[in-house]
Image (tube, helix red, strand yellow):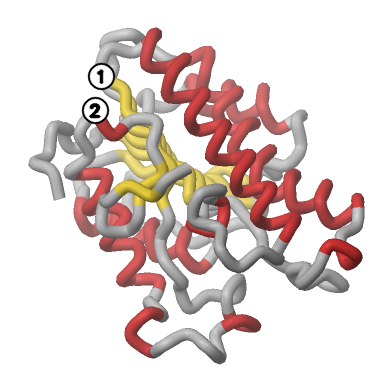
Amino acid sequence: MPQSETTQPQSILLAGASGGVGGALCRELAARFPEAILLTISRGDIAPISASHQHLISTLSDPESVPAITEWLRGQPLPNWIIDCCGSLHWAGHSPEKNLLQCTDEALQQSLTCNVLTHLHLAQAVAPLLQRRSPLTWASLSAKVGSIEDNQLGGWYSYRMSKAALNMLVRNLSIEWGRKVEDCRVVAVHPGTTDTPLSQPFQDNIPTDKLYTPEQSARRIVSVLEALPQSDSGKLLFWDGTTIPW
């Protein structure tokens, strides 16, 4: 992993904090950066994890959440790190498609809402607050299956398409914000297959050593961000910091 060029965050914003990986990240961030202010967002309430922990209940898939989040953040120290864990692979009545004829407009629209708009809206909420001389690291939890070059199996149409769209959002953000913020890193991170409700229906063929606990994934993601060089901005990274092709 490259030598760290980042400084430790003084304020961290974590979205999707009530999920499996999000909850583990919340605990890991609080433990690793006990002096940092931890700001979290999720659709429901969560228990405070430290004295400086501030939580906002908000539905990031809703565009009306954008101005409310912006105003909430105006009353907080500007985050140095922003991690968005929002995403969904399956839901009631929908499993990943095995072939083209299983694709529906509704499933694709829902997948785009869960996996892309939740990140777009958070970025829109943060954008008015960016300061040129305030370091910024943004990480969107993405997926290796969103890589076009890596796709050798097919299937999972709506999920793959939505993650590919998220990866393009990250690439665009890295360019726009890289022009506005002097010390800026914007990446997508693939955490690997983690033992959460998102992956549970699909774990039967996963080798034991390739199925990671939420705590493992959280430690790895934070370590990647700690050691993130500016030259990696705009990339899709594996949990060990190596680059996955777009």
Mark 2 surroundings within 10 Å by alpha-carbon count, few (fewer than 14), some (14 through 19), many (20 or more):
some
Please provide percent x and percent y for residue 196: 53, 75
Residue 110 shows up from this direction: yes
Residue drawn at 21 percent across, 48 percent down? 33
Please provide percent x and percent y for residue 148: 56, 48
Q: Secondary structure at mark 2?
A: helix
Q: CA distance from mark 2 to mark 1?
A: 8 Å
Q: Is residue 158 left or right of residue 136?
A: right
Mark 1 surroundings within 10 Å by alpha-carbon count, few (fewer than 14), some (14 through 19), many (20 or more):
some
Q: Secondary structure at mark 1?
A: loop
Q: Is residue 160 left or right of residue 75?
A: right
Q: Tell me which numbered mark, 2 or 1, is placed earlier along the sequence.
A: 1
Residue 184 or 83: which is nearer the viewer? 184
Residue drawn at 73 percent across, 68 percent down? 90
* Residue 76 position by quadrant: top left
Q: Residue furthest left?
A: 3
Residue drawn at 31 percent across, 22 percent down? 184
Kindly identify which numbered label has been placed on residue 167: none
Asked whether the beta carbons under mark 2 and mark 1 sit within 8 Å of each other, the answer is yes
Tell me the kind of residue under disc 1. Asp
Q: Is residue 158 left or right of residue 147?
A: right
Residue behind mark 2: 230
Residue behind mark 1: 183
